[in-house]
Amino acid sequence: DGGITQSPKYLFRKEGQNVTLSCEQNLNHDAMYWYRQDPGQGLRLIYYSQIVNDFQKGDIAEGYSVSREKKESFPLTVTSAQKNPTAFYLCASSTRGRGPYNEQFFGPGTRLTVL
Amino acid sequence: AQSVAQPEDQVNVAEGNPLTVKCTYSVSGNPYLFWYVQYPNRGLQFLLKYITGDNLVKGSYGFEAEFNKSQTSFHLKKPSALVSDSALYFCAVRAQGAAGNTPLVFGKGTRLSVIA
């Protein structure tokens, strides 16, 4: 899982609550990403950030928010507006250098369950 | 728009037999292609990538993949499967014209089961 940490590993949320998932990397990577994984649906992009203080919506951004105040950190907030938040959330990062063939490195994931 | 198709949700193979996990892609221009593996409740691990040049790419754990431009395919292969290869495999693509910090586009994954 490289130099990317995600916390907590398991998270339980009551309906109507906002929760924040942590993602930290020590790889000195410029870009960071959040994906949601559901059975049979693969990885769907929520948000990504190519550089500090900037981020873009992915395919399923509704009900989520992010910030990128530091290069090392890219927290994801799952808001009460997200109607079906139970899923496995994966954070990833990549370097801007060396060309567009850079692979992404993934963290170990956070499993969020709504009670 | 870029896309990846993994036509098989599940692949079953006997231990010691060769395995193939299929992937086809759609991208404007030339692609960069990637394979990842995921074990239960873990993040994705990088296996290999195709950049340019030799169409047969060798990666981690004895895996290799063959790039076929005419068929827009990038199938993952291993000559002799192990029970420990059982996992979820993802194919991903990025167009060569895209910057290195743009997201990869992933397929839906193929679950490989190797039976002893």
Image: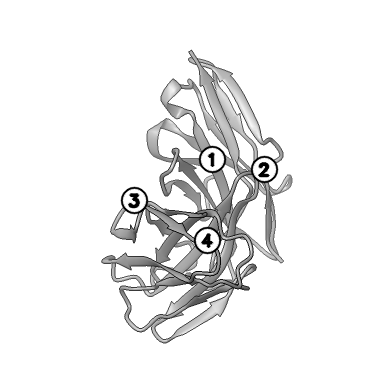
Q: How many marks?
A: 4
Q: Are marks 1 and 2 in contact (CB under 8 Å)?
A: yes
Q: Position of residue B109 (x, y in %)?
A: 60, 43
Residue kind at label 3, given as amino acid type: Asp
Residue kind at label 4, given as amino acid type: Tyr
Q: Tell me the crowding category of disc 4: few under 14, some 14 to 19, or many 20 or more residues within 10 angstroms, Cα based.
A: many
**Which element type, helix, strand or loop, lies under badge 2?**
loop
Any part of residue A103 in sight: no
Residue kind at label 2, given as amino acid type: Gln
**Above or below: residue A26 compared with residue A1:** below
**Above or below: residue A31 compared with residue A87:** below
Q: Residue furthest bottom?
A: A53
In-image side of A69 versus A82 (left or right):
left
Q: Which mark is residue A1?
A: 3
Q: Are marks 4 and 3 in contact (CB under 8 Å)?
A: no
List the residue tagged with mark 4: A35
List the residue tagged with mark 2: B6
In-image side of A96 versus B33 (left or right):
left
Q: Residue at x 61, y 45 (%)?
A: A39
